[in-house]
């Protein structure tokens, strides 16, 4: 199992550009989430999904869109990048009734100029 | 409102000694889970240990143990016999109720292990 994979690892955008951060998991987990980590802070929840076709907003959803058409994939779209979106983005997955760990991807480091 | 507080921005410990990293939480839910993650300088998030609110015994995983004091709403991580490789950021996180994929994180504690 590859676990949770994220692409790209690094990305530089200009203000106003759009892009999609990719996330995939091969563990058949129903639950997936996107977090961002800013310097000196813990992770904050952006959007999450409890299954294909079902998504909801987390703590900091503004400026981001998600969709979940398959169990495996959960892409995060930046609609019009802003410097405030410079951050490290983590995707995570866990199984239903996951009383144990969330499995995190390696992260995507995004810089918006 | 749900909240995780880690009051120690930085800690240091001598190799082979034990260290306690503090975590307090705030929730009105009866059912919740508490997690500790390690983030080395390479950036990945490594799961260390989990404690459920209904678990009667403190969780242990190898050199990691969680000192769970429910009445005080604290969930401190104890690392025994520290190793140089334990130098990293450590995050406490909480899951409330059925929000299995909705974790709330503290700001973290940076641990430095000295030889």
Image (cartoon, rainbow, N blue to C red):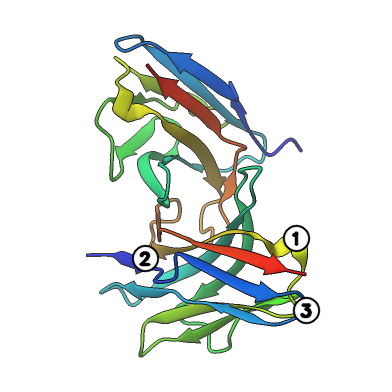
Q: Is residue B100 left or right of residue A47?
A: right
> From this viewpoint, is residue A75 visible?
no
State how far apart marks 3 and 1 are (Cα).
11 Å
Q: Is residue A73 left or right of residue A26?
A: left
The answer for which chain carries disc 1 is B
Q: Nearer the viewer, mark 2 or mark 1?
A: 1
Callout 1: few (<14), some (14-19), or many (20+) C-alpha neighbours within 10 Å? few
Label 2 secondary element? loop
* Residue A111's disc number: none
Image location (x, y in percent) of residue A68:
44, 27
- Upstream in the sequence, badge 3 or badge 1? 3
Q: CA distance from mark 2 to mark 1?
A: 34 Å
Using the numbered discs, state the Cα–Cα distance from disc 2 to disc 3 in whole angstroms.
Answer: 37 Å
The residue labelled by disc 2 is B97
In the rendered image, the residue lying farthest to the left is: B1
Residue at the image point whose x is 45% and y is 56% from the top: B100
**Vertical relation: B25 (above or below) A20:** below
Q: On screen, A65 above or below A58?
A: above
Residue A105: percent from the left, percent from the top?
A: 60, 38
| Foreground residue among B11 and A94 | B11
Residue at disc 1, secondary structure: helix
Report the residue marked by disc 3.
B16
Mark 1, residue position: B85
Q: Please tell me which of labels 2 and 3 falls first in the chain.
A: 3
Q: Which residue sits at x=35%, y=9%?
A: A17
């Amino acid at each position: 199992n590859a676990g949770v994979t994220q692409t790209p690892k690094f990305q530089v955008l200009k203000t106003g550009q759009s892009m999609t951060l990719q996330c995939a998991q091969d563990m058949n987990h129903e639950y997936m989430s996107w977090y961002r980590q800013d310097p000196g802070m813990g992770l904050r929840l952006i959007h999450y999904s409890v299954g294909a076709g079902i998504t909801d907003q987390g703590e900091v959803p503004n400026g981001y869109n998600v969709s979940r058409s398959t169990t495996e994939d959960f892409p995060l779209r930046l609609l019009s990048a802003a410097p405030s979106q410079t951050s490290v983005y983590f995707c995570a997955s866990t199984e239903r009734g996951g009383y144990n760990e969330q499995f995190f991807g390696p992260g995507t480091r995004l810089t918006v100029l | 409102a749900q909240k995780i507080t880690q009051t120690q921005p930085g800690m240091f410990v001598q190799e082979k000694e034990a260290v306690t990293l503090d975590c307090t939480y705030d929730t009105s839910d009866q059912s919740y889970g508490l997690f500790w993650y390690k983030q080395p300088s390479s950036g990945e998030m490594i799961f260390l240990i989990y404690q459920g609110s209904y678990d009667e015994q403190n969780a242990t995983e190898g050199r990691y143990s969680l000192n769970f004091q429910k009445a005080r709403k604290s969930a401190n991580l104890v690392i025994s016999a520290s190793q140089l490789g334990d130098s990293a950021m450590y995050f406490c996180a909480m899951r409330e109720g059925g929000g299995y994929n909705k974790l709330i994180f503290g700001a973290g504690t940076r641990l430095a292990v000295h030889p």
